[in-house]
Amino acid sequence: MKAIISVVDRVNHWILQLIAIIFGFVSLLTVYQVFARYVLKSPLIWSEELVRYLMIWMVFLGGAVALRKGLLISVEIVQHLVPRPVRKAMEVLTVAVNMAMLAVLIVYGFGIMDNLAGQRTGAMDIPVAWTYAAIPVGSILAFLNSLVVLTEIFSKKERENDGGDLII
């Protein structure tokens, strides 16, 4: 199981690197678009569309990694007020609900891509399905990260029963 967790963490590392590259490119392209519009008086027609699509991809990929690292917004006050066994059950229930929602996103994401198969974007003339592919791809990555989180919840429970130290 540690090998699978290691592979998922390595994939997350590469996703974060990709997000950083995309973010840098989006920033540079946005600055150049402003320069071209106001200084050169010749705006780029396609840049706004590309920036929008890349930001969609960044959100879905970043959400998958954020889920694994526990960086998504949550209301934890209730978990801190209940006894440890109830807290574990709440954590498992939360991850299970997340996984169910991600499964829905995966199925419907592929359905949306299929429905948009023949359409192309206005300015860049690329398939619209490429943009919507962020939904199932990000959801699949988030689902895998949810499996890792669920595995760690159960392994943390076993360490607690053994009296081992918890590393959070």
Image: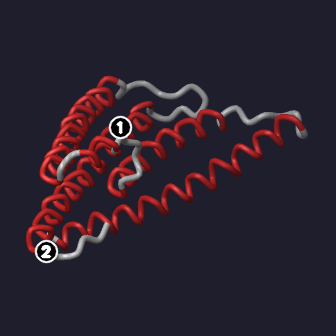
Q: Is residue 46 left or right of residue 77?
A: right
As helix, strand or loop, the secondary structure at mark 1 comes to helix
Q: Residue at x 33, y 45 (%)?
A: 137
Q: Residue at x 31, y 23 (%)?
A: 115
Q: Which residue is mark 2?
A: 163
> In terms of depth relative to the viewer, which is nearer, 43 or 146?
146
Q: Quadrant of residue 44?
A: top right
Please determine whether, in this image, residue 118 is positioned above or below residue 167: above
Q: Residue at x 26, y 68 (%)?
A: 7
The percent coordinates of residue 32 (x first, y second) are 77, 46
Q: Is residue 37 left or right of residue 149?
A: right
Report the quarter where the N terminus lies. Answer: bottom left
As helix, strand or loop, the secondary structure at mark 2 comes to loop
> In terms of depth relative to the viewer, which is nearer, 135 or 112?
135
Type of the residue with mark 1: Ile
Q: Which residue is mark 1?
A: 135
The percent coordinates of residue 88 (x first, y second) are 16, 51
The percent coordinates of residue 9 (x first, y second) are 32, 66
> In terms of depth relative to the viewer, which is nearer, 53 or 124?
53
Earlier in the chain: of badge 2 and badge 1, it is 1
Q: Determine the CA span between mark 2 and mark 1.
A: 41 Å
Please determine whether, in this image, residue 113 is positioned above or below residue 2: above
Q: Is residue 93 left or right of residue 53?
A: left
